[in-house]
Image (cartoon, rainbow, N blue to C red):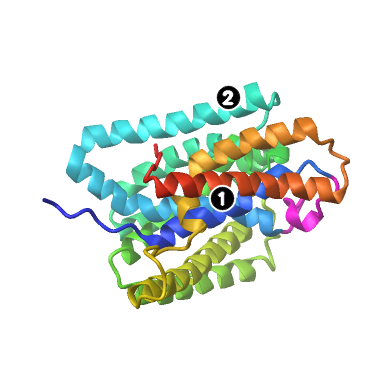
């Protein structure tokens, strides 16, 4: 019987970290009592909230390179292509329903962005890593060349979305492509080497983003090059830290100092069911906003924000203990 490959614990934790931050920030963004540092930056600059979406895209890209190879070997090329198309289409449809039917407003939702971004990045995965890197660089150069004439007007038209609208899926796909190269290179390495390599790569990307920010302002809404680099580098450094934390937990379990759990207890369960957690969090957020007014005091606002997080986290842990993993 073929042995099932072990899950990449730090990758699950990476997804889980993005969801852990995304749930309370999304739930609290409409409440005036929630401080600005816990919300998306309204214009230029960055807050903690502005790192979440790139971190999720980075985690998506990390898994795509090796998961594509496994699926191709198991199902063949035609079924692999069909699965990718169906998955991205479902994400886009769910996102559209969430905003046009549930939220009752026209905007560009995270799931819509994930569906389109995933579709754009997917063909690049069939290239060997060196050619994928060159293709990603060419894509970045093309974006910057067309920015004044095409991308800036598109980003401005969807400025309120905070993620560039439909045109923003193209530069955001660069994060997925870059992460797929990193993920393919690190996946089969020992945990210590993975952590060290991720830290070195992350510092290099972050440093380049900070250097570019001297000439190109950091602006999430306009998806500036400096923002993309800073966010990607930060996500890679987070991966390195989570590798260290996962290795520590696994080491304690092996030494008999912990129970059977070998990953991070909250981040792991959230990271194994991230889309379910996100969508369920959206429903709870809608309920909280219907009950609590936007001008509620800080106690009620924070209770709603952290309450959504607590409920979804408990649900994710229960699903995880029952071995239930819902993925597209």
Q: Quadrant of residue 78?
A: top left
Looking at the picture, tell me which residue is in the foreground, 242 or 201. Answer: 242
Question: How would you rate the neighbour count of disc 1 (Cα within 10 Å): few for under 14, some for 14-19, many for 20 or more?
Answer: many
Q: Quadrant of the C terminus?
A: top left
| Marks 2, 1: nearer the viewer | 1
Upstream in the sequence, badge 2 or badge 1? 1
Q: Secondary structure beneath disc 1?
A: helix
Q: Which residue is mark 1?
A: 19
Q: Are the residues at dot 2 and dot 1 in contact (C-beta closer than 8 Å)?
A: no
> Eyeballing the image, is 216 above or below 283?
below
Magenta-highlighted residues? 32-46
Q: Quadrant of residue 279?
A: top right
Residue 298 position within the rendered picture, expressed as x and y whole percent measured from the top left: 85, 50
Left or right, residue 193 beside residue 43? left
Q: CA distance from mark 2 to mark 1?
A: 20 Å
Q: Specify whether residue 160 is painted magenta.
A: no
Q: Which residue is mark 2?
A: 97
Task: Determine the main secondary structure of the stretch shown in magenta.
Answer: loop
> Eyeballing the image, is 156 above or below 132?
above
């Amino acid at each position: 019987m073929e042995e099932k490959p072990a899950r990449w614990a730090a990758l699950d934790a990476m997804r889980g970290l993005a969801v852990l931050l995304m749930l309370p920030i999304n739930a609290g963004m409409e409440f005036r009592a929630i401080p600005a540092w816990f919300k998306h930056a309204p214009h230029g600059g960055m807050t903690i909230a502005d790192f979440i979406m790139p971190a999720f895209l980075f985690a998506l890209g990390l898994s795509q390179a090796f998961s594509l190879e496994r699926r191709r070997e198991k199902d063949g090329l035609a079924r692999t292509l069909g699965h990718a198309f169906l998955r991205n289409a479902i994400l886009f449809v769910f996102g559209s329903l969430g905003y046009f039917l549930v939220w009752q407003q026209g905007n560009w939702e995270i799931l819509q962005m994930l569906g389109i971004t995933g579709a754009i990045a997917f063909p690049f995965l069939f290239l060997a890593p060196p050619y994928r890197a060159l293709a990603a660089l060419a894509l970045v150069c093309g974006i910057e060349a067309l920015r004044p004439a095409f991308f800036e007007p598109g980003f401005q038209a969807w400025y309120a979305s905070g993620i560039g609208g439909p045109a923003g899926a193209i530069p955001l796909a660069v994060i997925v492509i870059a992460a797929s190269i990193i993920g393919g290179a690190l996946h089969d390495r020992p945990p210590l080497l993975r952590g060290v390599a991720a830290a070195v790569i992350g510092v290099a990307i972050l440093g380049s983003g900070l250097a570019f920010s001297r000439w190109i302002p950091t602006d999430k809404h306009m998806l500036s090059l400096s923002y993309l680099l800073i966010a990607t580098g930060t996500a890679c450094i987070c991966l390195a830290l989570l590798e260290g934390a996962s290795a520590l937990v696994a080491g304690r379990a092996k030494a008999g100092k912990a129970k059977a759990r070998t990953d991070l207890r909250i981040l792991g369960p959230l990271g194994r069911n991230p889309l379910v957690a996100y969508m369920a969090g959206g429903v709870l957020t809608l309920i909280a906003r219907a009950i609590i007014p936007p001008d509620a005091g800080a106690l009620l606002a924070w209770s709603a924000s952290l309450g959504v997080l607590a409920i979804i986290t408990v649900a994710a842990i229960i699903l995880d203990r029952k071995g239930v993993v819902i993925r597209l």
